[in-house]
Image (cartoon, rainbow, N blue to C red):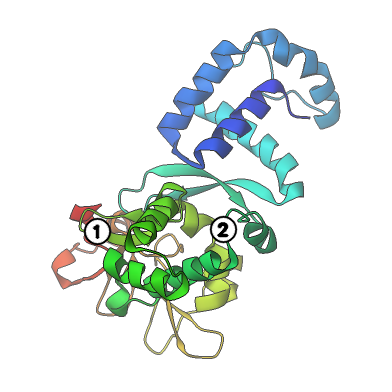
Amino acid sequence: MLTDIHRVLLTYIRSVKAIQLNSLLEAFTLIIQRLHPEHEHEHEHEHESESGHNTINSPSIEPSRDALEQYIREINAEITKQGFKIDRKNDELNGTLYFIFINTAMDEIIKQTTIYTHMELVAIKNLIEEIIEAEHFAFSLPRSNAQQIVLSHLSRPLKELSYFIDRLIDEGWFKATLDDRLILSINSLCELKQYLLETYGDTNLSEGNRRENRSQDRDIVDGGNGAESKLLVCRQCKELVTLGFLSIEKDAFHRRCYEVYCRNNRIEANEDNLLRVGADPSTL
Protein backbone atom coordinates (compact mmCIF):
# COMPACT_ATOMS: atom_id res chain seq x y z
CA MET A 1 0.00 0.00 0.00
CA LEU A 2 1.36 3.40 -0.97
CA THR A 3 1.78 5.97 1.78
CA ASP A 4 1.79 9.75 1.47
CA ILE A 5 5.55 9.73 0.98
CA HIS A 6 5.20 7.19 -1.84
CA ARG A 7 2.50 9.26 -3.51
CA VAL A 8 4.35 12.58 -3.27
CA LEU A 9 7.56 11.00 -4.52
CA LEU A 10 5.71 9.41 -7.46
CA THR A 11 3.96 12.67 -8.31
CA TYR A 12 7.26 14.55 -8.25
CA ILE A 13 9.12 12.07 -10.48
CA ARG A 14 6.19 11.96 -12.89
CA SER A 15 6.13 15.76 -13.12
CA VAL A 16 9.84 16.16 -13.89
CA LYS A 17 9.91 13.01 -16.11
CA ALA A 18 13.67 12.50 -15.69
CA ILE A 19 15.93 13.47 -12.80
CA GLN A 20 19.51 12.81 -11.68
CA LEU A 21 20.09 10.66 -8.62
CA ASN A 22 21.60 13.46 -6.52
CA SER A 23 18.73 15.84 -7.33
CA LEU A 24 16.18 13.13 -6.56
CA LEU A 25 17.86 12.42 -3.22
CA GLU A 26 17.57 16.12 -2.34
CA ALA A 27 13.88 16.11 -3.24
CA PHE A 28 13.36 12.85 -1.31
CA THR A 29 14.99 14.41 1.75
CA LEU A 30 12.60 17.38 1.58
CA ILE A 31 9.62 15.08 1.19
CA ILE A 32 10.65 13.09 4.29
CA GLN A 33 11.26 16.27 6.28
CA ARG A 34 8.00 17.98 5.34
CA LEU A 35 5.66 15.05 5.81
CA HIS A 36 4.93 14.50 9.49
CA PRO A 37 5.99 11.04 10.76
CA GLU A 38 2.37 10.34 11.60
CA HIS A 39 1.67 10.10 7.88
CA GLU A 40 3.91 7.04 7.82
CA HIS A 41 3.02 5.70 11.24
CA GLU A 42 -0.63 5.08 10.39
CA HIS A 43 0.45 2.66 7.63
CA GLU A 44 3.34 1.00 9.44
CA HIS A 45 1.56 -2.00 11.00
CA GLU A 46 -0.53 -2.63 7.92
CA HIS A 47 2.58 -2.63 5.72
CA GLU A 48 4.36 -5.04 8.06
CA SER A 49 1.46 -7.49 8.01
CA GLU A 50 1.32 -7.46 4.20
CA SER A 51 5.04 -8.01 3.64
CA GLY A 52 5.71 -10.27 6.63
CA HIS A 53 8.72 -8.21 7.72
CA ASN A 54 9.69 -4.68 8.64
CA THR A 55 10.54 -2.30 5.80
CA ILE A 56 12.04 1.15 5.67
CA ASN A 57 8.54 2.61 6.13
CA SER A 58 8.94 3.89 9.69
CA PRO A 59 8.69 7.27 11.43
CA SER A 60 12.46 7.36 11.97
CA ILE A 61 13.36 6.78 8.32
CA GLU A 62 16.58 8.40 7.14
CA PRO A 63 16.47 9.79 3.57
CA SER A 64 19.34 7.70 2.24
CA ARG A 65 19.85 6.23 -1.22
CA ASP A 66 18.90 2.78 0.08
CA ALA A 67 15.65 4.21 1.42
CA LEU A 68 14.96 5.95 -1.88
CA GLU A 69 15.60 2.75 -3.82
CA GLN A 70 13.22 0.85 -1.55
CA TYR A 71 10.47 3.43 -1.99
CA ILE A 72 10.87 3.29 -5.77
CA ARG A 73 10.68 -0.52 -5.72
CA GLU A 74 7.46 -0.32 -3.75
CA ILE A 75 6.05 2.33 -6.08
CA ASN A 76 6.93 0.23 -9.12
CA ALA A 77 5.21 -2.79 -7.59
CA GLU A 78 1.98 -0.79 -7.72
CA ILE A 79 2.25 1.24 -10.92
CA THR A 80 3.50 -1.58 -13.15
CA LYS A 81 -0.03 -2.96 -12.95
CA GLN A 82 -1.16 0.14 -14.87
CA GLY A 83 1.68 -0.03 -17.40
CA PHE A 84 3.98 2.55 -15.80
CA LYS A 85 7.44 2.32 -14.30
CA ILE A 86 10.13 4.45 -12.73
CA ASP A 87 13.08 3.25 -14.77
CA ARG A 88 16.74 4.11 -14.53
CA LYS A 89 19.32 4.90 -17.14
CA ASN A 90 22.87 6.21 -17.11
CA ASP A 91 23.64 9.31 -19.10
CA GLU A 92 25.56 8.17 -22.18
CA LEU A 93 28.09 10.98 -21.94
CA ASN A 94 29.07 11.13 -18.27
CA GLY A 95 27.46 8.05 -16.73
CA THR A 96 25.22 10.03 -14.35
CA LEU A 97 22.32 7.90 -13.12
CA TYR A 98 18.84 9.17 -13.97
CA PHE A 99 15.45 8.03 -12.75
CA ILE A 100 12.80 8.30 -15.46
CA PHE A 101 9.03 7.90 -15.36
CA ILE A 102 8.00 5.86 -18.39
CA ASN A 103 4.99 4.16 -19.92
CA THR A 104 5.78 0.49 -20.52
CA ALA A 105 2.87 -0.19 -22.87
CA MET A 106 3.53 1.04 -26.42
CA ASP A 107 -0.18 1.27 -27.22
CA GLU A 108 -0.67 3.50 -24.21
CA ILE A 109 2.33 5.65 -25.15
CA ILE A 110 0.56 6.44 -28.40
CA LYS A 111 -2.83 6.91 -26.72
CA GLN A 112 -1.48 9.33 -24.15
CA THR A 113 -0.15 11.59 -26.88
CA THR A 114 -3.63 12.90 -27.61
CA ILE A 115 -2.20 16.41 -27.33
CA TYR A 116 -0.81 15.77 -30.82
CA THR A 117 -2.73 15.42 -34.05
CA HIS A 118 -2.30 12.33 -36.21
CA MET A 119 -0.02 14.17 -38.63
CA GLU A 120 2.05 15.58 -35.77
CA LEU A 121 2.63 12.03 -34.52
CA VAL A 122 3.65 10.99 -38.03
CA ALA A 123 6.13 13.87 -38.08
CA ILE A 124 7.57 12.83 -34.69
CA LYS A 125 7.96 9.26 -35.91
CA ASN A 126 9.80 10.47 -39.02
CA LEU A 127 12.13 12.65 -36.94
CA ILE A 128 13.03 9.65 -34.79
CA GLU A 129 13.59 7.57 -37.92
CA GLU A 130 15.92 10.16 -39.44
CA ILE A 131 17.95 10.39 -36.24
CA ILE A 132 18.34 6.60 -35.92
CA GLU A 133 19.17 6.16 -39.60
CA ALA A 134 21.63 9.05 -39.82
CA GLU A 135 24.81 8.14 -41.72
CA HIS A 136 27.98 7.10 -39.91
CA PHE A 137 26.08 6.50 -36.65
CA ALA A 138 25.64 10.25 -36.13
CA PHE A 139 22.32 9.69 -34.30
CA SER A 140 21.47 13.34 -34.81
CA LEU A 141 19.65 15.61 -37.23
CA PRO A 142 20.25 19.26 -38.14
CA ARG A 143 17.37 21.43 -37.01
CA SER A 144 16.94 22.78 -40.54
CA ASN A 145 16.42 19.22 -41.80
CA ALA A 146 14.00 18.58 -38.96
CA GLN A 147 11.95 21.60 -40.01
CA GLN A 148 11.79 20.31 -43.58
CA ILE A 149 10.57 16.93 -42.35
CA VAL A 150 7.89 18.56 -40.23
CA LEU A 151 6.92 20.81 -43.16
CA SER A 152 6.34 17.75 -45.34
CA HIS A 153 3.63 16.64 -42.91
CA LEU A 154 2.32 19.92 -41.52
CA SER A 155 1.43 22.83 -43.75
CA ARG A 156 2.36 25.62 -41.39
CA PRO A 157 4.37 28.85 -41.49
CA LEU A 158 8.08 28.53 -40.71
CA LYS A 159 7.65 30.23 -37.34
CA GLU A 160 5.06 27.65 -36.28
CA LEU A 161 7.29 24.80 -37.44
CA SER A 162 10.10 26.15 -35.28
CA TYR A 163 7.72 26.46 -32.34
CA PHE A 164 6.57 22.86 -32.83
CA ILE A 165 10.16 21.58 -32.67
CA ASP A 166 10.82 23.67 -29.57
CA ARG A 167 7.71 22.13 -28.06
CA LEU A 168 8.99 18.60 -28.74
CA ILE A 169 12.27 19.52 -27.05
CA ASP A 170 10.48 21.00 -24.03
CA GLU A 171 8.25 17.94 -23.72
CA GLY A 172 11.22 15.58 -23.67
CA TRP A 173 11.14 13.93 -27.09
CA PHE A 174 14.45 15.41 -28.22
CA LYS A 175 17.41 17.39 -26.97
CA ALA A 176 19.04 20.23 -28.91
CA THR A 177 22.83 20.48 -29.15
CA LEU A 178 24.75 23.76 -29.15
CA ASP A 179 25.30 23.43 -32.90
CA ASP A 180 21.54 23.14 -33.47
CA ARG A 181 21.16 19.41 -34.01
CA LEU A 182 18.43 17.21 -32.56
CA ILE A 183 19.26 14.02 -30.67
CA LEU A 184 17.03 11.62 -28.77
CA SER A 185 16.57 12.61 -25.15
CA ILE A 186 17.32 10.23 -22.30
CA ASN A 187 13.54 10.09 -21.78
CA SER A 188 12.93 8.87 -25.33
CA LEU A 189 15.80 6.39 -25.28
CA CYS A 190 14.37 4.86 -22.12
CA GLU A 191 10.66 4.90 -22.92
CA LEU A 192 10.99 4.04 -26.62
CA LYS A 193 13.66 1.36 -26.19
CA GLN A 194 11.32 -1.50 -27.02
CA TYR A 195 9.94 0.35 -30.04
CA LEU A 196 13.46 1.10 -31.31
CA LEU A 197 14.51 -2.52 -30.88
CA GLU A 198 11.45 -3.85 -32.66
CA THR A 199 11.73 -1.32 -35.48
CA TYR A 200 15.49 -1.08 -36.04
CA GLY A 201 17.05 -4.08 -34.36
CA ASP A 202 16.72 -7.48 -32.74
CA THR A 203 14.04 -7.81 -30.06
CA ASN A 204 16.24 -10.42 -28.36
CA LEU A 205 18.26 -7.53 -27.00
CA SER A 206 15.33 -6.43 -24.86
CA GLU A 207 15.50 -9.79 -23.11
CA GLY A 208 19.20 -9.33 -22.41
CA ASN A 209 20.28 -11.70 -25.15
CA ARG A 210 22.46 -9.63 -27.46
CA ARG A 211 23.12 -11.51 -30.70
CA GLU A 212 26.55 -10.83 -32.20
CA ASN A 213 27.68 -11.32 -35.74
CA ARG A 214 30.48 -13.68 -34.74
CA SER A 215 32.21 -13.58 -38.11
CA GLN A 216 32.95 -9.88 -37.62
CA ASP A 217 32.77 -9.75 -33.82
CA ARG A 218 30.26 -6.94 -34.08
CA ASP A 219 28.22 -5.28 -31.36
CA ILE A 220 25.71 -4.10 -33.92
CA VAL A 221 22.23 -5.44 -33.35
CA ASP A 222 21.26 -7.78 -36.17
CA GLY A 223 18.01 -6.79 -37.83
CA GLY A 224 15.22 -9.34 -37.89
CA ASN A 225 15.51 -9.77 -41.64
CA GLY A 226 19.24 -10.39 -41.50
CA ALA A 227 20.09 -6.85 -42.57
CA GLU A 228 22.58 -4.83 -40.57
CA SER A 229 20.76 -2.86 -37.90
CA LYS A 230 21.05 0.85 -37.27
CA LEU A 231 21.42 0.20 -33.56
CA LEU A 232 24.64 -0.17 -31.60
CA VAL A 233 25.02 -2.00 -28.30
CA CYS A 234 27.67 -1.19 -25.71
CA ARG A 235 30.07 -4.09 -25.26
CA GLN A 236 30.46 -3.22 -21.58
CA CYS A 237 26.95 -2.41 -20.29
CA LYS A 238 24.85 -3.99 -23.10
CA GLU A 239 22.68 -0.87 -23.50
CA LEU A 240 22.00 1.05 -26.70
CA VAL A 241 24.70 3.49 -27.78
CA THR A 242 23.82 6.80 -29.42
CA LEU A 243 26.74 8.69 -27.86
CA GLY A 244 30.13 7.05 -27.60
CA PHE A 245 32.68 5.19 -29.70
CA LEU A 246 32.91 2.49 -32.34
CA SER A 247 36.16 0.56 -32.71
CA ILE A 248 37.75 -0.74 -35.90
CA GLU A 249 36.49 -4.17 -34.84
CA LYS A 250 32.96 -2.69 -34.68
CA ASP A 251 32.73 -2.83 -30.90
CA ALA A 252 30.52 -0.05 -29.55
CA PHE A 253 31.04 1.67 -26.21
CA HIS A 254 29.72 4.55 -24.18
CA ARG A 255 32.58 6.88 -23.24
CA ARG A 256 32.69 5.90 -19.58
CA CYS A 257 32.12 2.25 -20.46
CA TYR A 258 35.14 2.32 -22.79
CA GLU A 259 37.35 3.45 -19.90
CA VAL A 260 35.97 0.69 -17.66
CA TYR A 261 36.35 -1.96 -20.38
CA CYS A 262 39.96 -1.03 -21.05
CA ARG A 263 40.80 -0.95 -17.35
CA ASN A 264 39.14 -4.31 -16.67
CA ASN A 265 40.86 -5.96 -19.63
CA ARG A 266 44.21 -4.23 -19.11
CA ILE A 267 44.03 -2.57 -22.50
CA GLU A 268 45.55 0.82 -23.17
CA ALA A 269 42.73 3.24 -23.97
CA ASN A 270 43.27 5.04 -27.26
CA GLU A 271 40.36 7.16 -28.43
CA ASP A 272 42.31 8.27 -31.52
CA ASN A 273 41.61 4.90 -33.13
CA LEU A 274 37.89 5.06 -32.46
CA LEU A 275 35.03 6.39 -34.56
CA ARG A 276 32.83 8.89 -32.76
CA VAL A 277 29.23 7.77 -32.35
CA GLY A 278 26.61 10.47 -32.04
CA ALA A 279 26.84 14.21 -31.67
CA ASP A 280 30.03 16.11 -30.81
CA PRO A 281 30.33 15.90 -26.99
CA SER A 282 31.53 19.51 -26.85
CA THR A 283 28.09 20.60 -28.11
CA LEU A 284 26.10 18.80 -25.42
In the rendering, at what x and y percent does residue 3 appear?
72, 24
Depth check, front residue: 167 or 250: 167
Give the mark nearest the N terminus, 2 or 1. 2
Amino acid identity at mark 2? Tyr
Q: Which mark is residue 180?
A: 1
**Count of marks overlaid on the render:** 2
Horizontally, residue 47 falls left or right of residue 7, namely: right
As helix, strand or loop, the secondary structure at mark 1 comes to loop
Q: Is residue 221 above or below residue 225?
A: above
* Quarter of the N terminus within the rendering: top right
Amino acid identity at mark 1? Asp
Q: Which mark is residue 34?
A: none
Measured Cα–Cα span from mark 2 to mark 1: 24 Å
In the rendering, at what x and y percent does residue 73 appear?
65, 38
Q: Which residue is mark 2?
A: 116
In the rendering, at what x and y percent does residue 63 appear?
53, 20
In the rendering, at what x and y percent does residue 209 appear?
57, 71
